[in-house]
Amino acid sequence: MRVELRIDGEAAVAEIDRPGESLLSTLRDRLGLTGTKNACEQGECGSCTVLLDGDPVCSCLVATAQCEGREVKTVVGAVPRPVRDAFIACGAVQCGFCTPGLLVSVADLLEREPDPRDAQIREALAGNLCRCTGYEKIIDAVHAAAEAMSSEAISDGVPRVPARSHLHHNQWINVSNIPRAAGDSTEDTP
């Protein structure tokens, strides 16, 4: 079965053998897009979260055949740099297995609510499990990303992430000094 869809803004064609093949399997095994993680395969952990036509879904629960003509955004295409940088700056990443799903969920939240309250963050991340960091640093990272994405947090074209309670209060971190994650080169650093 041939399925045509868009992934991270690019046209893609997936040849699948069975109609029930999950979008997660297609992304990772057929298309080599391994940023989306495979953890529980039951829709419980959120590690495989992607945006499907703008809505967060667990890709392990969506059949690829249902994606004909639809837009899929993975951690590669859905997550703005300030969100990734905030996770690094705030120490919200440890083993990294849950990180892609968390990043996609946070990007979706900040698209809908640019200045979320803690309760909104907790609700948006309710479908994402993290067994390493606890959630305080993740919540700090969401607030930092929201602030970094606001026009007030950008000075001279370099985003700065406000440090939260685990660092010095009101300290600003120049994220261009943080080593890049996910294979980013430093060549694009402003």
Image (spheres, rainbow, N blue to C red):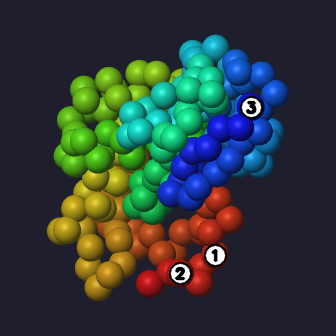
Q: Amino acid at mark 1?
A: Ser
Report which residue position mark 1 lands on. Answer: 185
Q: Residue at x 20, y 46 (%)?
A: 115
Measure the C-alpha gap from mark 3 to mark 2.
40 Å
Residue 34 appears in the rendering: no
Nearer the observer: mark 3 or 1; the answer is 3
Quadrant in which the C terminus is drawn: bottom left
Tell me whether the residue at label 2 lies in contact with that at label 1, contact meaning CB atoms closer than 8 angstroms: yes
Q: Position of residue 31 (x, y in %)?
A: 75, 47
Q: Nearer the viewer, residue 67 or 182?
A: 67
Position above or below: 43 against 57: above
Q: Position of residue 18 (x, y in %)?
A: 77, 22
Q: Nearer the viewer, residue 40 or 84?
A: 40
User: Horizontal placement of 20 versus 10: left or right?
Assistant: right
Q: Quadrant of residue 131?
A: top right
Q: Amino acid at mark 2?
A: Asp
Measure the C-alpha gap from mark 2 to mark 1.
7 Å
Q: Residue at x 18, y 68 (%)?
A: 152
Q: Residue at x 74, y 31 (%)?
A: 1
Q: Position of residue 120 (x, y in %)?
A: 25, 30
Q: Secondary structure at mark 3?
A: loop
Residue 120's label in the rendered image is none
Report which residue position mark 2 lands on. Answer: 188
Point out the tag, 3 or 2, that comes first from the N-terminus. Answer: 3
User: Horizontal placement of 139 versus 94: left or right?
Assistant: left
Position above or below: 181 against 62: below
Q: Amino acid at mark 3?
A: Met
Q: Quadrant of residue 64?
A: top right
Q: Secondary structure at mark 1?
A: loop
Report which residue position mark 3 lands on. Answer: 1
Position above or below: 34 against 174: above
